[in-house]
Image: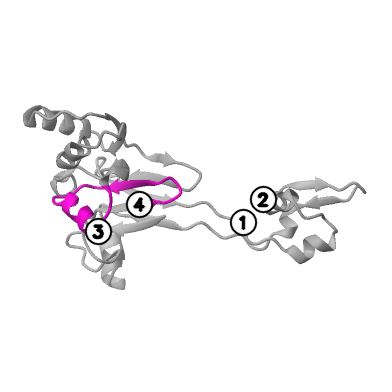
Amino acid sequence: MKIINLKQKYLFTYSFQDISSSFILKIGQLGQIWLFNCTEGCQYILARKKIKISQISKIIITDLRVQNISGLLGLLSSLSLNSSIKNIDLYGPEGLSNYLFLGRKYSQTNFRYIVSIYSIQTGIIVQNKFFQIYAFNMLKYFSLFNYSILMPERPGPLDILKVRSYKIPLGPLYGNLKLGKDFILPDGVVIFGNNFVNSYYLGNKLTFLSYLDERQLLEIGKYGFLISY
């Protein structure tokens, strides 16, 4: 998975005056691009970065501020020019469906594909075997959501020398041991897969803050910067 910020060069915000952000998740395993927020000029930025909009399958709108949705209708209209696109999943706070309906009505725009709109609530909004996207709203502002991208832990490398010391034959059994599965050998010896795997790699966690409360602002002032993915 690769993260590309569309509004600035780096994934760091050094000023908290405007932390609105737009970025993409480029998921090579799925051959898909997931877009967070669609700002004005988003299509131009994507073209300049040589990112194919035809690979966009999901669009996640963090909140309904104009700077985060001003390019949405234009992008959805451009996607209609690609006949290979059959469905776009659109996630956002309550009110996004009304915005899209009225925008289509007054611009007299129709899409050639299905737009599936999901109203975001606190909890997991997207999940697959590669990562989860978890949304949690601010208690003061129920229409503003922050997001965490959680990647699962991965097993460490298999201790080949230790496996061979048990005279386990080379083959598919090695892969099952790496997954932590247990086996009983023909002589009755019980093999526990976890004993043959080195330390697990902890999954990364990225948090995107679309809103900061007073406590978070004080922390930024203390440390001087905020990681805003």
Q: Are marks 3 and 4 in contact (CB under 8 Å)?
A: no
Q: Is residue 75 visible?
A: yes
Amino acid residing under circle 4: Leu
Q: Earlier in the sequence, mark 1 or mark 3?
A: 3
User: CA gap, disc 1 to disc 3?
Assistant: 34 Å
In the visual, does 14 lie left or right of 156? left
Q: Is residue 229 visible?
A: no
**In the rendered image of this protein, does residue 226 appear above or below residue 64?**
below
Amino acid type assigned to the residue bearing label 1 in the image: Pro
Looking at the image, is mark 2 or mark 4 earlier in the sequence?
4
> What span is colored magenta in the figure?
25-52
The reply to whether dot 1 and dot 2 touch (C-beta < 8 Å) is yes
- Dot 3 surroundings within 10 Å: few (below 14), some, or many (20 or more)? few
Q: Secondary structure at mark 1?
A: loop
Residue 182 percent coordinates (x, y):
76, 47
Q: CA distance from mark 2 to mark 4?
A: 27 Å
The residue at which mark 3 appears reads as 49
Q: Which residue is mark 2?
A: 179
Residue of label 4 = 25
